[in-house]
Image (cartoon, rainbow, N blue to C red):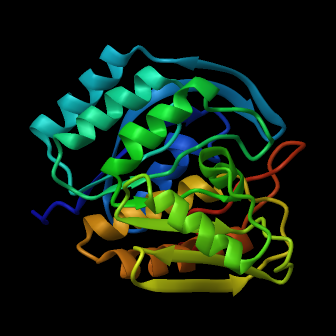
Amino acid sequence: MSAAPPLCLTVAGSDSGGGAGIQADLKTMMALGVHGMSVVTAVTAQNSLGVRGAWELPAEAVTAQYRAVVDDIGVRAVKTGMLSSAVLVETVAELLAGTPVPAVVDPVGVSKHGDALLAASALDAVRSELLPRATVATPNLDEVAQLTGVVVQSEDDMRRAADAVLGYGPRWALVKGGHLAAHRGEAVDLLTDGTREQWLRAPRHDNRHTHGTGCTLAAAIAAGLAKGLDVPQAVTAAKDYVTGAIAAGFALGGGIGPVDHGWQGR
C-alpha cells in the first residue's frame, strides 16, 4: 500500500464550466501530486461566455464541510477563492485561524468575463479578517485596486501595491501583473514579504483561452506548500506550471476557454 500524497484543501466556488473555481483547483492539485479536498462556498452557473447566476451556501454548510475534512482527514495547506459575502469571509477567516497550516488567499473580486464575485460590503472583512490569516495573498491588478486603491501601471506601482496589501497582514504578497499593459510581451509578478523581493517573469503567450488562471496559480502555490516547499519555491514552481497551462489553453464553447491543467502529461 503506497503512502498517501500530501493533503490540500480548497475553499471556493464551483464553476459549472470546469475552467475555474473548485474544479480548476482540484485538477491543479491532482496534476501536481497532492490530494485535493474541497469546501464549496457557492454554486455558479457559468460557461465560456460568463456567469449566469451564483448561489451562496450558508455559513453553516461551509463550516460543516471544512470541519468534516480537517477533523478527520487533516490538511497540509489551504487555498481560498470565491467568498462572496462578509459572512462567508468572516466564517472562513475564523476557520483558518484554528488551522495551523499555510493558507493561500486568492481575493477573488471579478471573473475573467468581468462578472462581480465579491460584494462590496465584503471588502472590509477581506481586509480586516481574511488577509491577516494569509501566508500568501495573490491579488491581480484589479483586485489590488479594489482592496487598496492603488492603480498599477508600472513595476514601481506594483511595489506600492504590494506594500499596501502587506499592510493588511499577510506574510507574503504576490501581486500578479498579467494585465499590465506596460509589459505586452511578458507576464510579470512581484512576490515580497516586505524585506525580500522576487520578480517572476515569463513570456506572455498569445492565447485568449485563459479562464481559471488565478485559481490555478493559487492552487498550485498551495500544492507546493503542502509538499513542504517554502513560499518562494512554491510560487516559482506555480508560476512555471500556470505559464505552461496558459500556453496549452484550449477553445471551449463560444467564449474564453480554460487553461489546460493536464498540460504536463500531454
131 vs 101, nearest the viewer: 131
Point 84% across, 37% down: residue: 49
Residue 195 is situated, as x and y percent measured from the top left of the image, at 39, 81
- Which quadrant: the N terminus? bottom left
**Eyeballing the image, is 8 above or below 90?**
below
Residue at 22% from the left image edge and 62% from the top image edge:
6
**Rendered location of residue 33, percent (x, y):** 34, 67
Which residue is pictured at 55% across the width and 53% down the height?
Answer: 215
The quadrant of the rendering that contains the C terminus is bottom right
Q: What residue is at 21 percent from the left and 36 percent from the top? A: 69
In this rendering, is residue 13 above or below 205?
above
Q: Is residue 48 left or right of residue 90?
A: right
Q: Is residue 181 left or right of residue 264?
A: right
Q: Does the image show residue 266?
A: no
- Count the labels in the image: 0
Residue 237 visible at all: yes
Q: Is residue 85 above or below residue 103?
A: above
Place residue 255 in its image quadrant.
Answer: top right
Return the residue found at the far right.
254
The one of 139 and 216 positioned closer to us in this rendering: 139
Percent position of residue 106, x then y: 50, 51
Q: Position of residue 141 (x, y in %)?
A: 69, 59
| Left or right of residue 97, residue 87 in this image | right
Q: Quadrant of residue 47?
A: top right
Q: Quadrant of residue 63?
A: top left
Q: Is residue 84 above or below residue 108?
A: above
Q: Is 93 on the left-hand or right-hand side of 179? A: left
